[in-house]
């Protein structure tokens, strides 16, 4: 009896400890969301999304240039990272046992752990200093480098989950290995790959350090890829350390917009994951 009572007690205590750990992990998130939403919601308005920043010392204005700049930078990073990341993931899954695939996998894992400021300094050295010009292209390159390992590893894992019978069936019908991968295996894993892309976008949405070294900032609206361009993260940073109360208010609003962007990416990734689970359970 004592042994049975002790097993039940230890099991209940362990479950309770796990639940308490989850609550403790959610506390910082709850506080961050509370402060960002409570402070930022008061400053959000139509002007914030449609107006440009006002001159120093004047109240009002918005972050229209920073919002557009963030979309441009994320788009450039995606154009650079998605093809490279997906093709790398395909190679690692198709040649999983090769030495070169192991090297790519190790490089992706290492790159994923490199601090973002190091990536920014690297891109500064290869894309800013030689041309003596901050630019949107350099900023997109820095963000793309940070996206590549996430997309590559996600693509690899999702392709490995595709049943081998699908590939074998395509090969039995006379398809080449490349055709079998791109016409059968890759479409089957597409929802999961989309999940990886969304997670990568959420990863780069809040990055500031690499953009300070690459795209810098621009208080004016520009869509030129060869000029400095504004972004929400850098704009929020600049406003937050300023001595003006109105800029502090707008910094909170910008932070709220960033949080909402990350939340949307996370929701889309979760929806894609549920679709994968539904497809897997129906097989």
Image (spheres, rainbow, N blue to C red):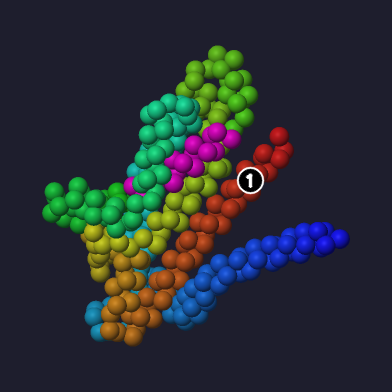
**Residue drawn at the location 34% of the way across and 52% of the way down:** 114
In the rendering, at what x and y percent does residue 39 appear?
46, 80
Foreground: 258 or 119?
A: 119
Q: Quadrant of the C terminus?
A: top right
Apparent side of residue 232 relative to residue 218 in the rendered image (left or right): right
Q: Quadrant of the N terminus?
A: bottom right
User: Badge 1 is on which residue?
Assistant: 275
Q: Is residue 156 magenta?
A: yes
In the rendering, at what x and y percent does residue 33 appear?
51, 73
Q: Residue furthest front?
A: 2
Foreground: 49 or 128?
A: 128
Q: In this view of the protein, can residue 199 be seen by the observer?
A: yes
* Chief SS of the magenta region: helix
Sort mark 1 into few (<14), some (14-19) or many (20+) by Cα contacts within 10 Å.
some
Q: Which range is magenta?
A: 144-161
Q: Is residue 115 magenta?
A: no
Apparent side of residue 258 relative to residue 209 in the rendered image (left or right): right
In the rendering, at what x and y percent does residue 168 appear?
59, 20
In the rendering, at what x and y percent does residue 180 appear?
53, 23
Apparent side of residue 25 relative to residue 122 in the rendered image (left or right): right
Q: Is residue 94 above or below residue 257?
A: above
Quadrant for residue 69, please give it. Answer: bottom left
**Residue drawn at the location 59% of the way across and 35% of the way down:** 161
Q: Is residue 46 above or below residue 212?
A: below
**Residue drawn at the location 45% of the way across and 36% of the way down:** 89
Total numbered labels placed on residues in the image: 1
Q: Secondary structure at mark 1?
A: helix
């Amino acid at each position: 009896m004592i042994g049975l009572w002790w097993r039940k007690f230890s099991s209940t205590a362990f479950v309770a400890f796990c639940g308490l750990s989850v609550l403790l992990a959610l506390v910082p998130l709850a506080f961050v969301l509370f402060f960002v939403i409570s402070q930022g919601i008061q400053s959000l308005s139509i002007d914030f999304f449609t107006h440009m920043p006002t001159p120093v010392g004047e109240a009002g204005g918005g972050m229209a240039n920073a919002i557009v700049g963030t979309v441009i930078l994320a788009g450039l990073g995606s154009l650079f990272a998605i093809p490279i990341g997906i093709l790398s993931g395909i190679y690692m899954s198709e040649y999983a046992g090769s030495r070169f695939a192991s090297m790519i996998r190790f490089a992706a894992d290492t790159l994923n752990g490199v601090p973002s400021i190091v990536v920014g300094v690297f891109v500064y050295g290869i894309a800013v200093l030689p041309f003596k010009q901050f630019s949107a292209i350099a900023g997109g390159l820095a963000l793309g480098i940070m996206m590549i390992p996430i997309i590559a590893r996600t693509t690899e894992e999702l392709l490995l989950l595709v049943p081998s019978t699908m590939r074998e069936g395509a090969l039995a019908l006379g398809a080449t290995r490349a055709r079998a991968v791109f016409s059968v295996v890759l479409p089957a894993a597409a929802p999961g790959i989309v999940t990886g892309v969304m997670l990568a976008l959420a990863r780069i949405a809040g990055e500031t350090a690499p953009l300070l070294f690459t795209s810098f900032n621009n208080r004016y609206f520009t869509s030129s890829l060869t000029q400095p361009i504004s972004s929400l993260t850098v704009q929020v940073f600049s406003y937050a350390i300023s001595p003006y109360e109105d800029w502090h208010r707008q910094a909170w609003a910008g932070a709220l917009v960033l949080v909402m962007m990350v939340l949307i990416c996370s929701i889309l990734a979760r929806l894609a994951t549920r679709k994968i689970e539904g497809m897997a359970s129906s097989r």
